[in-house]
Image (cartoon, helix red, strand yellow):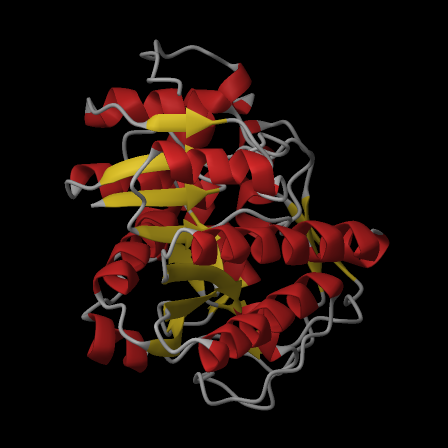
Amino acid sequence: MQILVTGGAGYIGCHTVLELLNAGFEVVVVDNLSNSKETALQRVAQLTGKPFAFYKIDVRDGAALNMVFDEHEIDAVIHLAGLKAIDASLEMPLEYYDNNLNSTLRLCEVMQHHNVKKLVFSSSAAVYGTPSMVPITEAFPRAATSPYGMTKLVIEDILQDLYRSDDGWEISLLRYFNPVGAHPSGLIGEDSNETPNSLLPYIAQVALGKLPKVRVFGADYDTPDGTCLRDYIHVVDLAQGHLAALRGLRLGVEAYNLGTGNGYSVLDVIAAFAKASGQPVPYDIVARRPADVAACYANADKAKRDLKWTARYGLAEICEDAWRWQYNNPNGYETHTIPVKKLENA
């Protein structure tokens, strides 16, 4: 079975490609490398010992994408390509709408042309906006509060309309919570081309001494220690969730939360990372951010029931693996301290 993974060189993408290869799938990767590096794929090839095809193209390029489908007998698609930073989407909404919406439209057009109707889509818990209560189930109303979240919400609606127009489609919408951690090997992990805009990678760089302190936005929330609670899911658990969704595809459109069901506070994460790394993680309490909510974590019972998937890793393992990656790759994939094997380039 050949699986196309769009955005396969990215943080979630390369972990998903690794899990697919280890499970015996044939894989074709498409990525424009705008916020990822080919080295990640080279390290996936090293870890698995298995070749796969890679095309450096933008998913919005319909002609190039058609060529990929012409070259390979694609059976299903895992669609991860897209811009993903909430703060950046507030500054560049048009770029986010153009990239995320048009890439999905081109992909679906090409899939339809080639009669490929199995799709796992990378959605987000951002479609829930500000939840009125926790834990969050898939039945909660959707109300995105950022352009990033709105692109995910609109794409979900597009895919629902696509199925209404052609009931041969099998689509899973995976609503991630907070992906963190790294592969236990320390070979692949999160390596943004910019300063980290999420908590755990920022903490890792503070522990490494690259950044001075963690800013904790508010300590007066109605939570056990006053800081925000979030659902942090190990990226390997998340990657395996894609395999479970792929195997569980059926006619229709189904949404699934992928999270642990546990809310960890900012101070919980700082303490866990300090313990895992053996390094001090200084922090300052600063003013709340306007858009932050006190608590946001998943009810993932539906994924457990329908997909036979559940998160296996806890906060301690998340921090240990994230530190192993950061320590061995202080400058991300640019470090090149670990020899990598060249993958097959299509």
Location of residue 189 in the rendering, given as x and y in whole percent from the top left corner: 43, 35
Q: Residue at x 60, y 27 (%)?
A: 209
Q: Is residue 3 left or right of residue 31?
A: left
Res 245 → quadrant: bottom left
Location of residue 271 in the rendering, given as x and y in whole percent from the top left corner: 47, 52
- List the single residue furthest toward the left: 24
Is residue 126 depicted above or below 331 in this figure?
A: below
The foreground one among 330 and 242 is: 242
The foreground one among 184 and 341 is: 341
Res 36 → quadrant: top right
Q: Residue at x 66, y 58 (%)?
A: 101
Location of residue 137 in the rendering, given as x and y in whole percent from the top left corner: 43, 85
Residue 34 visible to an observer of this rendering: yes
For the C terminus, the quadrant is top left
Q: Is residue 165 left or right of residue 240?
A: right
The foreground one among 123 and 327 is: 123
Location of residue 263 in the rendering, given as x and y in whole percent from the top left corner: 45, 71
Q: Is residue 273 left or right of residue 266?
A: left
Res 255 → quadrant: bottom left
Residue 187 visible to an observer of this rendering: no
Is residue 334 depicted above or below 52 in this figure?
A: above
Q: Residue at x 52, y 89 (%)?
A: 140
Is residue 284 depicted above or below 41 in this figure?
A: below
User: Total label count?
Assistant: 0
